[in-house]
Image (tube, rainbow, N blue to C red):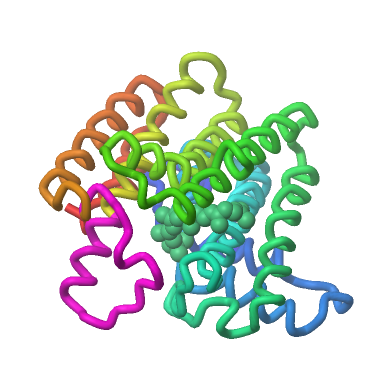
Amino acid sequence: FAEAGALSSGGSIDIAEIRAAIEDRLERQIDFDPIVPANLQAALRHALMGQSKRVRPTLMYLIAEPDGAAIGAVLDAGCALEMVHTASLIIDDLPCMDDAAIRRQRPTTHVAFGQPTAILGAIALLTRAFGIIAELDGVPTATRNRMATVLSQAVGWNGLVAGQEIDINNRAELGNAEQVEQLNWLKTGVLFVAAAKIGAILRGLEGERLEAVGHFARHFGLAFQTADDLIDRTETVAEAGKDVGKDGDKATLVSLFGADHARMTCQQHIAHAEQALLASGINGAPIRALMMRLLDKGQ
Ligand code: GRG
């Protein structure tokens, strides 16, 4: 795959090509050396290479808009995001969490490889993600440090982990739309913002433009989560017996306030995202196309 040729040819940016380049780069990232036990290798490959939209690395790539030599580093940073996201999915699917049997159109990692290997695999992906960022080729040390900080804040006790804790132990107490949106922010929004900010940092954006990218991604993430809940609800109603793990009875904007309210909230987030995208001054057309492609189904 001639990534520089395929991706830096200028003119229109093809989202499918970016996604293919990310898949290719992930394959290279998991070219394990023989010390990695075969079972762990298979579990990591199973979790990471299942059917995924690769939203976060694609978003990061579209914001970074790399050219020539920078493409490799941006794809590697995308792999790091995808590894963090995949680690969170493995943990989320465990019997003590959402107890899901299917993920990315495959049996979940713990179903296929057992809980111990699934947990170890998640830890391995999470740690490798930070290793990839530390080693990024051609990126100044200060930039790599900023990227690691952004990612660590998104994952840790202020981010995904906080969201998961609320989801598992406090979701029954969620009574109003602000609380549900706060959960959506922690479970989904934070990693969208990290992806977008990492792209912006790699591109060298600062100040108000960097802030605008963050606002854009926050609203995109919240719209994405709400659209996901709308799709889940439609599918659950349509096909009885769909495997939704323990998700089926969860409090979401859809289950608490109805599909119309959720649709309206989604539209509001899209409008805010569009405004912020405009304010960021970056090439909005391909990002808008990504957003619409992902959010249309939920409308
Ligand atoms: C170990 C990193 C780590 C975190 C621990 C388990 C946990 C805390 C957080 C889980 C948070 C979680 C599962 C949020 C759901 C986010 C979400 C919208 C998932 C679906 O994302 P898609 O649709 O999935 O982008 P694909 O498969 O396309 O990548």
Residue 288 image offset from top left, x and y in percent: 30, 41
State the extent of the magenta-drawn residues as a range.
228-254
Label total for image? 0
The image quadrant where one finds the N terminus is bottom right
Which residue is most to the right?
35
The reply, left or right, for residue 297 in relation to residue 75 is: left
Q: Residue at x 70, y 52 (%)?
A: 129
In this rendering, the answer to whether 220 lies above or below 83 is above
Does residue 172 appear in the picture of this structure? yes
Residue 79 image offset from top left, x and y in percent: 62, 55
Between 10 and 13, the one nearer to me in the picture? 13
The reply, left or right, for residue 291 in relation to residue 140 is: left
- Is residue 234 part of the magenta span, yes or no? yes
Between 130 and 138, the one nearer to me in the picture? 130
In this rendering, the answer to whether 123 lies above or below 292 is below
In this rendering, the answer to whether 271 lies above or below 57 is above
Residue 225 image offset from top left, x and y in percent: 34, 49
Q: Residue at x 27, y 35 (%)?
A: 269
Which residue is most to the left?
260
Q: Residue at x 84, y 73 (%)?
A: 33
In this rendering, the answer to whether 1 lies above or below 142 is below
- Is residue 177 part of the magenta span, yes or no? no
The reply, left or right, for residue 36 in relation to residue 232 is: right
Between 278 and 44, the one nearer to me in the picture? 44
Magenta stretch, overall SS:
helix
Q: Residue at x 21, y 50 (%)?
A: 256
Does residue 5 appear in the picture of this structure? no
Which residue is most to the top?
207
Residue 119 image offset from top left, x and y in percent: 68, 68
